[in-house]
Image (cartoon, grey):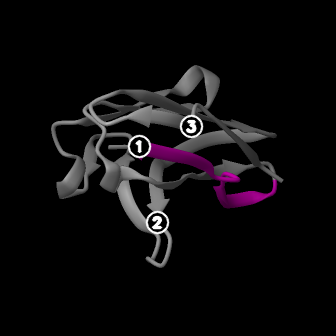
Amino acid sequence: QVQLAESGGGLVQAGGSLRLSCTASGRIFNINNMGWYRQAPGKQRELVALITRTGTTYADPVKGRFTISRDNAKNTVHLQMNSLQPEDTAVYYCNIQGRANYGDFGSWGQGTQVTVSS
């Protein structure tokens, strides 16, 4: 099974920055889509940013503030979050889709808490 390990969450003041990272491990042949989602208390999980082999997509609330990037050699996706606001407070989950030795996979990270204080 492909497993994901997330890091980089924490507590930051409004206007600050955080960088999240997520690394996939296992017998991975290739990775297609890599994304970040978030879930605030009482709300549904929502897409934050997605990076495919050919481009990126951002949710409107984070455009211009967040940047998603990938390191294919390390099976890693990053999310650079700048100008953080209290409404960005949530648990952030990475999702990686690709093909492993056992077939296609779509795995989720364990989640990392991001808290932005006003």
**Magenta includes 105?**
yes
Q: Callout 3, which amino acid?
A: Gly
The correct choice, above or below, for 60 with respect to 114 in the image is: below
Q: Which residue is mark 2?
A: 40
Q: Position of residue 97 (x, y in %)?
A: 57, 54
Q: Residues within 10 Å of mark 1 (few under 14, many from 20)?
A: many
Q: Earlier in the sequence, mark 3 or mark 1?
A: 3
Q: Position of residue 32 (x, y in %)?
A: 49, 47
The correct choice, above or below, for 59 with respect to 85 in the image is: below
Q: Residue at x 16, y 37 (%)?
A: 64
Q: Position of residue 80 (x, y in %)?
A: 38, 29
Q: Which residue is mark 3?
A: 9
Q: Main secondary structure of the magenta part?
A: strand
Q: Which residue is mark 1?
A: 116
Q: Is residue 107 left or right of residue 18?
A: right
Dividing the picture into quadrants, the one containing residue 14 is top left
